[in-house]
Image: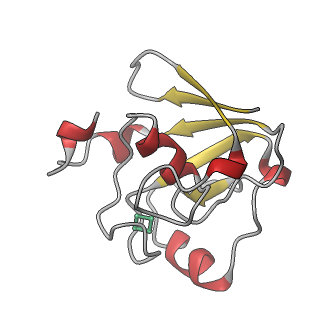
């Protein structure tokens, strides 16, 4: 089993999701097995204004641990990330970063400015 720890910069309680990457997709947005897919599939809300199609920056997450266990960012993701507020060297788009190891342990931070965006799909939480 893989483990995804989620820290919310707005102070919401931390969440830990255990999952089997081989069972992806868990939801219908983002690449199968991506951070967005895993979170939505476990009822943890992450913004995804473009539906997980690498066309916005609302699914921006900061990877604190396990970045090497995620798929490499493609050019389109890097171009979009350049527009993300609060970009860091370990920033990724949640809909594009796919967990690749069956026993991966990954920690991500969901930045405050991402959480604070108005969401039409807040009922997914
Ligand atoms: S949801 Fe739009 S880029 Fe990830």
Task: Indicate whether 56 appears above or below 95.
Answer: below
Point 54% across, 27% down: residue: 7
Residue 69 horizontal side relative to residue 122, left or right? right
User: Quadrant of the image for the N terminus?
Assistant: top right
Report x, y in % for residue 94: 53, 56
Direction front: furthest residue: 23
Label count reads 0
Residue 41 horizontal side relative to residue 70, left or right? left
Point 40% across, 60% down: residue: 28
Point 54% across, 73% down: residue: 82
Report x, y in % for residue 41: 44, 43
Residue 118 horizontal side relative to residue 82, left or right? left
Which quarter of the picture shows residue 107?
top right
Task: Indicate whether 80 appears above or below 12.
Answer: below
User: Quadrant of the image for the C terminus?
Assistant: top left
Q: 57 or 27, which is in the foreground?
A: 27
Which quarter of the picture shows residue 10?
top left
- Where does ligand 1 appear, by image quarter? bottom left
Q: 84 or 55, which is in the foreground?
A: 55
Render colour scheme: secondary structure
Task: Indicate whether 24 appears above or below 63.
Answer: below
Q: 34 or 61, which is in the foreground?
A: 34
Report x, y in % for residue 72: 77, 68
Report x, y in % for residue 38: 53, 45
């Amino acid at each position: 089993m893989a483990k995804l720890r989620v820290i919310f910069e707005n102070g919401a309680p931390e969440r830990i999701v255990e999952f089997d990457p081989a069972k992806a997709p868990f939801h219908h947005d983002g690449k199968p097995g991506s951070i967005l897919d895993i979170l939505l599939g476990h009822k943890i809300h992450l913004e995804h204004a473009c539906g997980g199609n690498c066309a916005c920056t609302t699914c921006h997450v900061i990877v604190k641990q396990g970045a090497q266990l995620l798929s490499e960012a493609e050019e389109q993701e890097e171009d979009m990330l350049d527009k993300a507020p609060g970009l860091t060297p370990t920033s990724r788009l949640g809909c594009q970063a796919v967990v690749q190891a069956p026993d991966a342990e990954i920690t991500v931070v969901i930045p405050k400015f991402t959480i604070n965006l108005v969401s039409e799909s807040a009922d997914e939480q």
